[in-house]
Structure formats: C-alpha cells, structure tokens
Amino acid sequence: MKHDLVLIAHLVFTVGHALAADPTAPRKTMAHAASGFEVLVPAPGPDAIADEILQQAIDQAASAGGGVVLLGVGDFKLSRKQGEETVVIKSGVTLRGQGYATHLYFDPTTPPNPQRYYPVRIGTDAVPAHNVVIEDLRYTGNDQAIGGGSIMGFNARLDAPESLLLSCDNITIRDCWIHDAKQAVGCSKPAARYMDADRLAAQFKNWQVHRNFIDTCGNKAVELAACNGGLIADNHIVNVADGPQVIFGSRNVQIRDNIVYFTSTGINVTEGSHHIRVSGNHVEPMPDINPGAVGPCLIFRTEPHPLDSKISDVVVTGNIFRNRTTRSQCTVRFVTRKEALSCVYEGITLTGNVFDGDVHFFDKMSPAHTTIRDIVFADNVCEGGVLSEPRGTMVSSHVLVRGNMLRQAGNVTLSASHWIWTGNTHVNGTLEVAAGANANIIRDNVTTAPMTDHGMDNVLTGNVVMKKSDSP
C-alpha cells in the first residue's frame, strides 16, 4: 500500500511539472485511474496548430489499451500533412469535447489540393481502428472555403489492396456539430467485387451515428458503405447535397428519426444494399434547391459501374417525404445508372408514410435495365400522384397498392401491368387504366367518379363510386 501511494505521488508530481513547463501539453489525470485512462488536452487557441498535441494524446490513450482524450474549451486548428490525414483516431480511444465550445477545424487558409483529405481519420489503410467514440464537440472542415479535393469529416476509408479484407468496427459518432465537410461521417471501400464472400465477411460492423447536427455537406451527409449493422438516427441534417446513404452491399442498417433538408437527393438506398429500415424521418428539399432538379426525398439507385445489382428487403415506414419545391415534386424515385448492366428492386415495403408529392414507380434513366417487383405500397397518405410505366418500357410485377388515401385532384393513371390495386380511397378523383396496362386486379376501391379501363384482361370488381352526398 505504501509503495502504491509513493508511485501515485511521483506520477502526479511528474505530470504537474510537465504542465508547468508547457500548459498546452496533454496531461494524464488520476481521477479515472481506477476505471480507465484519461488524457486532458487544453485548447491551444486559434494562433497555434493542434496537430501534435492531439495525436500525442490519442497515442497515449491507445498505448494504455484505450481511454478518453478529453478536449478543453477553445480552438484546435489542424493543418495539412503529407499523405491523406492529419490526426488518426486509434483503437479504444474516445475523443470527447465539452460541447459546442470545443472546436476542431481545418485551417481555412490551407491551399487547395486535388487529393481527398482527412483532417481527422478513423484508422488508416494499414491499421484500422475499432471501439472508437467521437462525441460532444464541434468540427468544421472548411471544404467550401478551401476547395480542391474533398475535405472529409469523421471517416474510415479502406481502399488499398491490402486493406480490403480489414474493417473498422464498433464506431460511434454522437452529439457533435459537424459543419462544411464534404462528407460528415462515413465508412467506405471501393465498389469492385463488393459482393464477394470474403468482402462480405470483412464488412464494417456496428457504426452508430446519432444526435448530431450536420450542416453543409457537398456530398452525402452520412455514408455507410460495405457495412453490416448500423444506425443513423436522430440527426438534424441541413443544407447537404445528399442525405444519409447505404451502399455497396450494406445490410442490417436503420435510418431512423432524422430531419433531412437537401439540395440534390434525400435518403439514398443504393448499390446492393439490403435489409434496411427507413423509419420516422422528415425529408424535403432545401427552399433554394434548383426547381429544375428532380429532388427525390427517397431514392433507390445504382452506382455508375458495370454491375448486375439487386436492392432488396427494405422497409420504409412512418416517414414524411415532402417535395413541393421542384417542378417534378418527386418524393420517391428508382434510378439505374446507364453504366449498370441491370438492377432488380424487390421486396420493398412502403407503409404508413406521408408522400407530399409524386411517387415515381419507374426509372427514367435506364428503364430497359430495371425490374421492380414484389413491392408493397400500403396505408400511406398521398398528396401527389402514384406514377407507373408500361410493361414495354420497364418491367414491374407483383406491386400491391393497398389501403392508401389518395388525395390528389383528378385521375390517377395506372400504366403498368400485373399490379394489384385494392382498397384505396380516391377522395378527389378516380383511377384510369391506360391502354396497354394488362392483367391488373383492381378491386374494392372507393372513388368519386367511375373508373375507366382501356387495357386488356384487367379484373375490376367491388369498386364503389362515392356519391357527392356521401362526402363531407
């Protein structure tokens, strides 16, 4: 016992002596000696570069087997180094600020450079990081101010050939303010051969991004690529080119209870992703979006790669998708890029949502390479149209449109074949079946005018025309 007291006294004296010599140096605290390792890092201020003191503190915590790097109130200015990153977060490290007053930022006077850059990177190609938490701080990338290559936020990227079978697992980014980074948070690997068995086994695991305020991104706000198990939740996301995205075979990810205001696309479910749940989000374009843009709030799409893709087993429920800003008023869209060989979109359920705008069940870009099938569109409130394409333009089948409240004035036109349209209420119009729309089952719907059928082999039964006196 006496020996332990002497050792602790010696450590406290040594740390205190070091602080007297350099008050900006990281310091270890004995307050958490029993429960873990902690390094206190005072803010060096706007006139100093914080690169070395941050990396030194992170290295100390990682070398101790993990711990907390506790940042003080004030400015931590980061400079550009040789390579791709300034500061590397290592395994077992929690980087914790003291709220908005702790500010990490990339020096806005940095000259532009065409290379993508990571002022704060989670692991490297050579040494990935696991069990990392970044919380309670403010980060500014100054991507727009600097220009050139993308200035990233808190990201892990493994794109070297020797790192494709590695991953960064158990990563949490929470309670942060992230401003002007090309991509605020994300994990990624290259697209090539992302569905190979060994690549699937080496996907990133358990990424959690929640309760952040994300402002101004020139790309995706949050991107989980090649990720098995993730949560993007309770974030307030404004003025971003694109909202949250899952891509490259990501699976078992929830995108939940976010507010998203975008300038290009909202939530993206893309390139091989499956078993995804999108729930409770409010998504709409920024007021200053280009009115000629399509501006979909929810988009299912491929990447521009020559691949045969499938996007499947997606549940979309309890969301508000609102687009009254662009001329297309698009809330949902499917896009197979021209470079793609094909894409099948299947097993998608959209239920209990509000669509304040049009739902596009078609692909305008590459319809001949697109198949939409086994879709449930049920119990939604639709303020716009539900739009489809003829079977000769794009293949769609086993699409169930059931129990929706369709509030758009005028007729809804069904152009597709092999759909089931049942139990819907057309409060301001009716359904018109287009010529060439064949083998549909249309039953038990309520309309305000008789339906018309210009197709062949359609079954219309049990539909009711509501009299004017029946309406309030």
Image (tube, grey):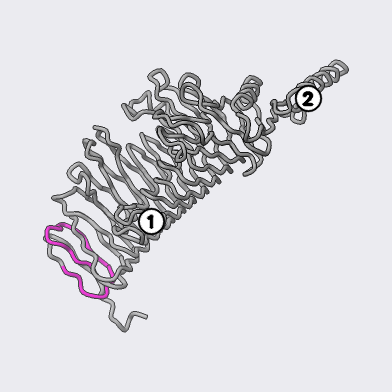
Q: Check the picture and name the quadrant holding the N terminus.
A: top right
Seen at 47% across and 50% down, the residue is 238
| Res. 335 image quadrant | top left
Magenta stretch holds residue 376: no
The image position of residue 105, as x and y in percent, is: 56, 36
Which residue in the rendered view is the most extreme toward the right? Answer: 2
- Marks 2 & 1, CB-CB < 8 Å contact: no
User: How many residues crowd around disc 2 within 10 Å: few (fewer than 14), some, or many (20 or more)?
Assistant: few
| Residue 100 visible (yes or no) | yes
Q: Does 392 sit above or below residue 103? A: below
The image position of residue 410, as x and y in percent, is: 25, 71
Lower position in the chain sequence, tag 2 or tag 1: 2
Which amino acid type is shown beneath numbered disc 1? Thr
| Residue 38 visible (yes or no) | no
Which residue in the rendered view is the most extreme toward the top? Answer: 3
Pick whichever, 347 or 272, lies toward us: 272
- Which element is circle 1 on? strand
Seen at 56% across and 25% down, the residue is 90
Pick whichever, 457 or 248, lies toward us: 248
For this view, does 68 lie left or right of residue 392?
right
**Which residue is the site of mark 2?**
20
Q: Which segment is the magenta one?
A: 431-452
For this view, does 441 lie left or right of residue 145?
left
Front label number (2 vs 1): 2
User: How many residues crowd around disc 1 within 10 Å: few (fewer than 14), some, or many (20 or more)?
Assistant: many
Q: What is the number of the mark on residue 351? A: 1
For this view, does 277 lie left or right of residue 103?
left
- Which element is circle 2 on? helix
For this view, does 321 lie left or right of residue 58?
left
Q: Check the picture and name the quadrant holding the C terminus.
A: bottom left
Q: What is the number of the mark on residue 132? A: none
